[in-house]
Amino acid sequence: MPTHPIDERPVILAVDDSVENLQVLTSLLKDHYRVKVAKSGSKALDLAHASPVPDLILLDVIMPEMDGFEVCEKLKSDPLTKHIPVIFLTALNEVADETAGLQKGGADFISKPISPDIVKARINVHLSLQAERKKADALLRVLLPDNVITDLINKGDHKPEVHKNVSVLFLDFIGFTAISNLLTPEFLIAELTDIFTSFDELCLQHGVMRIKTIGDAYMAASGLHADNTDHAANLVNAGLAFIDFIKRRNATSKQQWHCRVGVHSGSVIAGIIGKSRFIYDIVGMDVNIAARVESAGKPMEVTITETTLQLLGDRFKAQEMGVTSLKGAGDMLLHTVQAN
């Protein structure tokens, strides 16, 4: 059967108790948007939750049973719909009415009778703003955990937290300084961007979080934001995936890279560091140990501590490396692991 292209035009929900007004709005918008219509506030609330979810709502103020201000208030109190911009359509022109609408969470007002050019212009402005907000939200969710974002939005700050069951990974490229001196800055940055972007995707696949990159070093963790008993296995799997990616990339790439990966499990302190240029970071003795394990590890292997090994069960093949002296941590028994 032939496949039809997916309609990705923005969705506008038009709400008005007048059929004539809805017909006018539909005729005006249908060529550029997917239009949903509702003749009452209760129907509007239902359609706001139905797929496809509206990108913007045009909402009449004066309606029977439930007026537009009440509908807007309900939309803004619901986590699923509170981010949808609402433009009021109204014959009211008193400053007090506009103030009331904005206090309920409305984004704008358009006076009736409507001007087609004004409607189109206002919709375009608010959809553009909404698109930028979504880009910003997506970027924040790469940089910060959801609970941290929620705290920053609702409270303005996020208190540091102690997480007692976490695994931490460090990856470093072998001979990076010598290699980087032979490459152009543009080529070097392009290489790191390509590799770290792929690592980020692998982190998502394995349910772990990229914490930060420091030059050629990549740091990730698992178990920070849920009671995740598989945090060690998830992070080891991510480390193995990193190495497999580098091997496959080396088979076709002009530049060859080799790395070490170290994983250790324990407790960390997590929080926002900085103010104007803040980052989400983790610190503590067990973070330092993970970094030392990576430095002591074997090339193109995932090296782990005995603590991490005990959390893995029989899901991996482990080979003992012997006792190794780690700076600041003393002698520790290390292992390399591979998937069964």
Image (cartoon, rainbow, N blue to C red):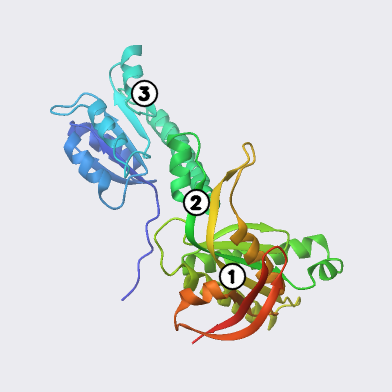
Residue 91 appears in the rendering? yes
Camera-nearest label, 3 or 2: 2
The residue wearing badge 1 is: 263
Do residues under tags 2 and 1 come within 8 Å of each other at their CB atoms?
A: no
Among the 4 quarters of the image, the one containing residue 38:
top left
Marks 2 and 1, how far apart at CA: 19 Å
Q: Secondary structure at mark 3?
A: helix
**Cβ atoms under marks 3 and 2 closer than 8 Å:** no
* Image position, residue 226 (x, y; %): 41, 58
Q: Decide which of 219, 333 is in the foreground and name it.
A: 333
Give the residue drawn at x 34%, y 38%.
82
Q: Earlier in the sequence, mark 2 or mark 1?
A: 2
Name above or below for residue 59 compared with residue 7: above
Which of disc 3 and disc 1 is earlier in sequence?
A: 3
Residue 41 location (% of width, % of height): 19, 34
Classify residue 78 by image quadrant.
Answer: top left
**Residue denoted by label 2:** 162
Element at badge 1? strand
Q: The residue tagged with tag 2: helix, strand or loop?
A: strand
**Disc on the earlier residue, 3 or 2:** 3
Most foreground residue, 242 or 253: 242
The answer to whether 311 is drawn above or below residue 160 in the figure is below
Give the residue type that dot 2 points to: Val
Instruction: Measure the alpha-carbon separation of dots 3 and 2.
Output: 40 Å
Looking at the image, which residue is at 32% across and 26% down? 104
Q: Residue at x 66, y 68 (%)?
A: 171
Residue 102: image tag: 3
Mark number, residue 58: none
